[in-house]
Structures are given as structure tokens and as C-alpha cells.
Image: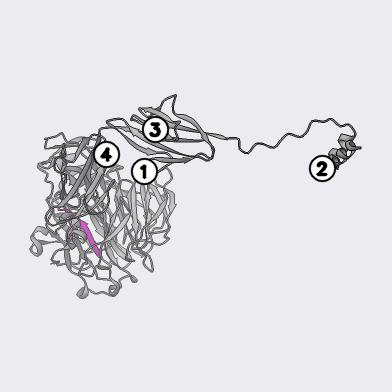
Amino acid sequence: MRSSLKLSAALVVMGSAVALAMLHGCHDSPEPAAPDLATTVLQTLTVLGTGTGNGVVRSSPAGINCTITAGVAATTGCRAQFSQGIVVTLTATPVSGHSFRSWSTCSGTGSCKVTMSVNRSVTAKFLKGPFSVKVISGATGVGSGRITSQAGLTPAINCVITNGIPASTGCSAKYPAYSKIILTATPAAGFSFVKWAGPCSGSGTCQYTFIQSVTVKVTFGSSSTSTVAREGRWESPVNTPVLSIHMSYLWTNKILLWGRRGEAYLWDYAKGAAGFTQIAAPFEVFCSGHSFLPDGRLFVAGGHITDHKGLPMAAYFDPVTESWSTTAMPMAQGRWYPTTTLLPNGEMLVLAGTDENAANVPVPEVWTGTQWRRLTNAPLNLPYYPTAFVAPNGKVFVAGPQTSSYYLDPSGLGTWTKVADRHVADRSTGSAAMYAPGKILYAGGGDNPTASAEVIDLTTASPSWRTIASMTYPRRHMMATILADGKVLVTHGTSGLVNDQALAVHYPELWNPATESWTRMAYEPAIRTYHSTALLLPDARVLSSGSGEGFGVDLAHSSLTAQVFSPPYLFNPDGSLAARPAISSAPTHLGYGQSFSVQSPDAANVTRGNLIRLSADTHWFNEGQHIWPLSFTNQAGSSTLSSTSPPDANRAPPGTYMLFLLNSAGVPSIARMISIGP
């Protein structure tokens, strides 16, 4: 009875299901017990190494005692297990002469705390000393001053920076790991210290403890950077006896110019207003096209009967005899507003224009030197003065102003091939320039005028136009001039329609191909809109002239003046004239792909140069200019600069070029004339 009561009580306690099983003799094994929550779970921490140095990483709690040699962790002591959830503190200690640089999972160089919620790895970077410091300028070509290290530091830093160029000595040194350096920047007279960059910032001292090699940038600027150093300067104007609608720079250092009314003039511009000599033209050369032949003569095609009606005549101007002569035969049709382009073989291509009956002339013609060759397989109606360039493939690239750009193969009877459409459909009276071999900038133009700009690179497999930053001012009837340093100066124009002088743009803008950005230049006092010209002089300045005689502006209200612009590269930050590199001697003629030498007392400071073909411009396009960049080598202590001429006529059409040297501050020399070609 007592046993039965105990069994019943047990059944109640155990529950009916279990109890029934027992009563029926069920002897299955019981379910497994739940895990013991007090059991310890372990996670693995692994230390890895990187870098070039030696050191030891230890942990707290103990477990890691990892030796790292030349950035490689040992096979023992670099892995340990810790209880899940615990925080492990790692400490890195470099050996003498080495430094600890960083953790992979923690910032700074102090201890690194790791929570062991899962398996983890941490990489420690040690570096082998000594470590170097190098001081450089944060602004190329700008600022002067001195950087010195604290007294007692050996070797000392005593670095002189002149116009943004550090001296060859005193600007670098090596120090043992964990040495401390304190650098002080002292500006030269007329300059200010702007900032540090690299391991330091701000404008106080630069303090650094060496755990790796570093480059310290220091920027000096003018204490009051002069306006001319930023924007350039316009010189006093000179009156001209005729409006400069057409202007060409001759290799004899004179300028040939003519307008709508009056004869052509030869100008020895070094003599100012006293340097003009009248040169009677063989026919009315107003609204012709003109470019230089390989022998230095100016070739002129077309001319004026009445508005929109062109002459079929062509002529030469010889700078040596200072006289005109006509070709043996006229063109097949007259041309008014044509473009002339010298071909790589020395022949002259003439495109576009309107004939004696004011009809468009679609068939290009080529002057071979003895006769005209019509490209009868290549008729194409083009607008006035199309912007045409010799491309690196030897064809002629017509950039616009029409929407589509084309290649013309001038061999045989001619062939046109479409290249690409521009983003801005109408750039009529905008200006274009080949600012580097095969690379073209096209800016402004249209009705209403645009400020936009775009570029194309003909050296690529599939050239296409690419939009770049816009100018500040919309403009048309402008002129794009390649400067001695390869930048492009855009002058003149109006933001209104045709010859709206009330909306004349007085501020030139400078385009930098390296940054594809525009900078506003100094205000030009004269109005320069329709019928204005600009060209690069051998002294690296730009001559600006003309405007008027058309679209409601009569001769009495036209700008019969010329004015020289001095770009910023001719000035020091304080506004004084910059010292120019000089050319002692240079070749007068070069073939293609020819090694040559230039002598300069400033050879050690010359970094590069440019060959720029002589200008022949009218309306909104310079039909003559072309650029070829040069690099130079120079042996220490030598005054000889060595380089190589352009490889072929596709990249540098034959003719006379101005050779400019540029020093490390970007200041150009006065040019020497060099003829390039066979």
C-alpha cells in the first residue's frame, strides 16, 4: 500500500506521458541534458606582420608574444586563444633603429584593443630606419623663402625655395627612427608663408617624429601678389594707318597688315607708329585667306569684288624683297572668306568662300606651286572661313563651324570622311586652335553667342568632341592665340549679335590645357569685335589690333590701333619683370627627326620649350599657327641643351617657327626663328 502511494505520487510529479511509459515498461534512454552555460568558449587571435622593420607585439592578458622580423611574423608566439567576449590589449614595441607604423584594425600607434567576439587577426606594421625628409614647394613657379630645422639637429635642413623651385641642396636629409624635427618657414622679401602640407598643416612650425619617410610641402606666395602677375598688362596703344583686318607675322620680324580700305602696310613694330611702310597689293586682298609657304613667303588666295563676291586671284608676298607677285594662273572660281591650309607636302589647300556671283564654292583647290588642282571628288559646302588643321594622319581636319567635323584627304581628286559631331551645333565666328599636336580647342561663337568650349583629340582611334569648362563671357568674333608656354589666350569678341560693340568683351581669358580651366586677364581698353586680329610676337607678348569697317561700324568709328598684351608669365609675383632664359645660339634650319642643340647660359634652369609656327590670321581664325612641344636634356655644368625636331610634316607642317625656351618658373625666352622642313 505504501509503495503504491509512492508510485502514484511519482506519476503526478513526472507527468502523464512519462508515467504511462514507465507503467508500461518503456525503457528508452532519456533526452540529452541542455548545455552547461558556464562552459568557456575560446576564440583565436592571430598577429600578422608587414613592412620592412623588426619588433615585438605582446598582449594583455598574456598569450601573444609575437616577434616580427622584416615585416614577417614568427611561426610561434603570434597566435593565442582567449575567452569569448574578452577585450585583449595589444602593444607593439620596435627594436632600436626601427619604428612601429600602424595597426590594421586600430588607429594611431598606441595600444590596440580587440574584442574577441569571433576569431580575429591584426596586422602590425614595422619599418626599418633611418627615414628621410624631403622639402618641396606646394606651388610650382610661385613663391620664395627658406625652410630651416631646429638648432642642434644633424644633418640640418636649410632649404631655399625660389619662385616655387627648391634648391638642389639643403632640402633633404635622413634621420634615425623617432628623431624629432621642427621646421620653420621664413618667406623672402615681398612674399608670405601660406601653409604646410604633408605630415603638417597650418601656418605655424612643422613638427614631426620620424616613423617613416615623409615629403613636406611648403607654399609661399606674394605678400601682395600684384595684379599684373595674375592678369598680365596692356601696353600703350599705337595708331595704325589701316584697319588690321588681316595680319601676318613675317620671319623678318615685320608685320604685314591690310584692311578693307587703303593699301597693305609693312610694319616694323619695334619702331612704333614710325615703322609703317605702304606696300601696294596686286588686287583687293580684303576678305582673302592667307598662310605661309615652306620658304617663308605669305600665300594669299581670293579677295574682294563686292560683299559676298570673291576674286579668283592668288598672290605671294616675299618678306625678303618686300614685294608682291601673283600666281601663274587664277583659281577656277573666285573666293571670298576662304581658308588656306599648308599641306605636309608644301602645297596650299584653299577651302570654301563665295565666287564672283556670290555662290558657294564647294570644290577645294590645291596650289601645287605651278598650277591649280581641283578636288572634284570632294565637293562640300562649307561656311565662311572654316577652321582647318593638318592632322597627325596627314589629312586636313575641318573642325567647323558647321556641326559635323570632317577629314579631307587632299590626294588625287580628294575624299571627305566624317569624324564627329560637336556638342554645340553652331560655332560660327567662334575660334579654334590646335593647342597640342592633334588636339584642338573650339570656343565661343553662334547666334546668340555661347561661352561654352569643347576639345577633340585626333590622336585617338575614334576622335570625339568633349565638353570642357566654359569661358566667363559669351563671345563671337574672337581670336584664339597660342602663347609661348602652350596656353591659349582668347581675346576680343562681343556677347551680342554680329558687330554689337555695346556688348564688346574687354576681358581676355587664358585657357590652361593642363587643367582645362579659364582665367580672366587684364581689361583691354579698346573695343575689339568684328574684323579684329591678334598674333603672338617673338618676345612672347600678343599683338591685338583692328575692329570695325562692317556691320554698321564705318571707318571713322573703327579701332585703327594696335596694342600689346604682356601675359602673366612675364612677371614676378611682385609685379617686376621676370628674368628670362636667354638663347645664345640656335640652328636656323632643321629637318624632320633631327637631333639639334641650343646654347643658353641658363641651360641648367630650362625645362622645356615650344616651336610655334608664325601667325597669319583674319576675322576669327589664325590660319598659320601650329605648335610642337620640345623637351631638352642638359649635362650638369653645360650650356648646351639637346633635343629632337618634329618627326614629320604631318605633326609640324613645313615653314618658319619661333623657338621659345621656358625655365622652371614658366618664363619664356625671346624666340629664335627656325625653318622646319626638307
Please report whichever mark, 2 or 4, sits nearer to the chain's N-terminal start. Answer: 2
Relative to 300, residue 78 above or below: above
Please report whichever mark, 2 or 3, sits nearer to the chain's N-terminal start. Answer: 2
The percent position of residue 261, horizontal first and vertical second, equals: 21, 68
* CA distance separating discs 1 and 4: 14 Å
Instruction: Name the amino acid type tagged 4.
Output: Phe
- Circle 4 — which element? loop
Of the 4 image quadrants, the one containing the C terminus is top left
Query: Which label sits on residue 13?
Result: 2
Q: In screen coordinates, is 21 left or right of 191?
A: right
- Circle 2 — which element? helix
User: Magenta segment, which residues?
Assistant: 532-542
Relative to 453, residue 80 above or below: above
Query: Which label sits on residue 57?
Result: 3
Do tag 1 and tag 3 residues touch (Cβ < 8 Å)? no
- Residue 293 visible in the snapshot: no
Do tag 1 and tag 4 residues touch (Cβ < 8 Å)? no
Please report whichever mark, 1 or 3, sits nearer to the chain's N-terminal start. Answer: 3
> Which residue position is annotated with label 4?
210
Q: In screen coordinates, is 419 left or right of 497?
A: right
Instruction: Name the amino acid type tagged 3.
Output: Val
Instruction: Name the amino acid type tagged 1.
Output: Gly
Alpha-carbon neighbours of circle 4 within 10 Å: few (<14), some, or many (≥20)? many
Tell me if residue 522 is in the magenta stretch. no
Residue toward you, 500 or 98:
98
* CA distance separating discs 3 and 4: 20 Å
Query: Which label sits on residue 108?
Result: 1
Please report whichever mark, 3 or 4, sits nearer to the chain's N-terminal start. Answer: 3
Q: Name the front one of labels 2 and 3.
A: 2
